[in-house]
Amino acid sequence: MDYQSALDYILTFADYERMPRSAVVFDLRRIRMLLERLGNPQEIPRTVHITGTKGKGSTSAMVAAILTQAGCRTGLYTSPHLLSFTERIQLDGKNISEADFARITGGLEPHIAAVNQSGGLGNLTTFEILTVLAFVYYRERRADFQVLEVGLGGRLDATNIVTKPDVCIITSISFDHMDVLGDTLAKIATEKAGIIKPGATVISAPQTPEAMDVIVKVAREHNCQLVKIGKDVTWRLNNFTTCGQSFTLKGLKRSYDLNVPLLGEHQLENAASAVTAAEILTERGVNISPEDIAAGLKNLHWPGRLQVLRSKPWLVIDGAHNAYSLKRLGEALRKYFKFKRLILIFGASSDKDISGMVSEIAGFAGEVIVTASRNPRSIKPAFLAEEIRKKGISLSISDNVAAATDLALKQAAPDDLICVTGSIFVISEVLERFR
């Protein structure tokens, strides 16, 4: 089995990134059965488990970068990817090789068939298989830590098969995937807080009172220490360029002067969570120095998040995938860039709150080009156009991302800014072109 054959095989199963979420049956018994056949590799490395609506990928990458800098052999499991499925399974900052991806998948195939044929639980999903692939890879490579980003929600996510995380991080919670997670912030927070386990320390980003009440309650029920970012740990922005920002962080143990090559106030919030995780792991016997924390953040590579691809005109990509993320994007563009005119390229998935997203766009963008990625869940540009016209925004329509980008570059003057956003699948197609 080569890499493409392995990938084709995995994608024959239900993939909720490409199909309606309501069509997926969430049941941890399937992945538990598969992992038991494999000797439960997920329980060997120590775990940092991260969920949330916005920032969980960036926070995961920061935690993994710090641990790797400290000399820990560290796995990072994230989703979705930008250019290659191998991005999802990293070890010490490097993607799993295509050869290892294919070899491990070949070894899993008979076990997958046995679980699927056992009856009563339905077939394993694409995400469940990828998650098991990551666990097997980290066991093979003798990882000290695995940093796991939740795919969707928390309570029933495949990554929630781990039972003894050292640290559980909950990043900012907002409305997203309401068809699966619930239509109130309390319901969504309940699903996210499902990753909290006895013995773990819980770190929470600033939340609405409704969401924080749930997190406090669940942490108390499991007798877990809860650290509140913004209250127990604070930060102050010192300076920024279009390449990154410097800030001072007052942690649980000491203060740090830090740099991170990511833009946006929310990234300082994410960094505060990552540094707090490092401090807690230090208390638990991991040798992480303040220098490791500083170097890990400074050398971080995490594309697709307010990433500048070119200047004159600015071309910026950001995977703002819900209304709250777009609100923060608008704030960041005004704060971190100087431009005369903003052209927004926007495409989204069909399960999103399009009305809410468009309402936020109306607050900062006067010109929008609507488009669609190649992902089957992409919403038709004509529907997006209908919503945007209601706000009186200047509008153009392009059937694909490449055409939308060409149109924006043709229209933009050197002192303008083009921002591509709305879906990680849209920005991945732009990144693929400009890489």
Image (cartoon, rainbow, N blue to C red):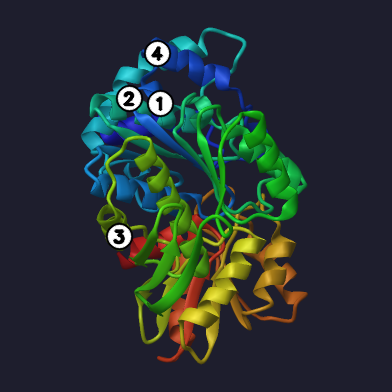
Q: Is residue 180 left or right of residue 112?
A: right
Pointer 3 residue? 294
In the image, what residue type sits under mark 4? His
In the image, what residue type sits under mark 3? Ala
In the image, what residue type sits under mark 1? Val
Question: Can residue 397 be spotted in the picture?
Answer: no
- Indicate which disc residue 132 carries: 1
Q: Residue 256 occupies which quadrant of the picture?
A: bottom left
Tell me the mark number nearer the camera, choosing from 1 and 3: 3
Quote the CA–CA distance across marks 1 and 3. Answer: 32 Å
Q: Residue 123 occupies which quadrant of the picture?
A: top right
The residue depicted at 49 percent of the width and 31 percent of the height is 159
In the rendered view, tell whether residue 143 sits above or below residue 43. Answer: below
In the rendered view, tell whether residue 180 sits above or below residue 119. Answer: below
Pointer 2 residue? 136
Image quadrant in which the N terminus is located: top left
Among the two numbered marks 3 and 2 on one chain, the one whose residue lies closer to the N terminus? 2
**Mark 2 vs 1: CB contact within 8 A:** yes
The residue depicted at 21 percent of the width and 43 percent of the height is 71
In the rendered view, tell whether residue 418 sits above or below residue 301. Answer: below
The residue depicted at 25 percent of the width and 37 percent of the height is 73
Quote the CA–CA distance across marks 4 and 1. Answer: 11 Å
Tell me the mark number nearer the camera, choosing from 3 and 2: 3
Pointer 4 residue? 111
- Check disc 1 and report its element: helix, strand or loop: helix
Q: Is residue 420 left or right of residue 70?
A: right
| Viewer-proximal residue among 307 and 403 | 307
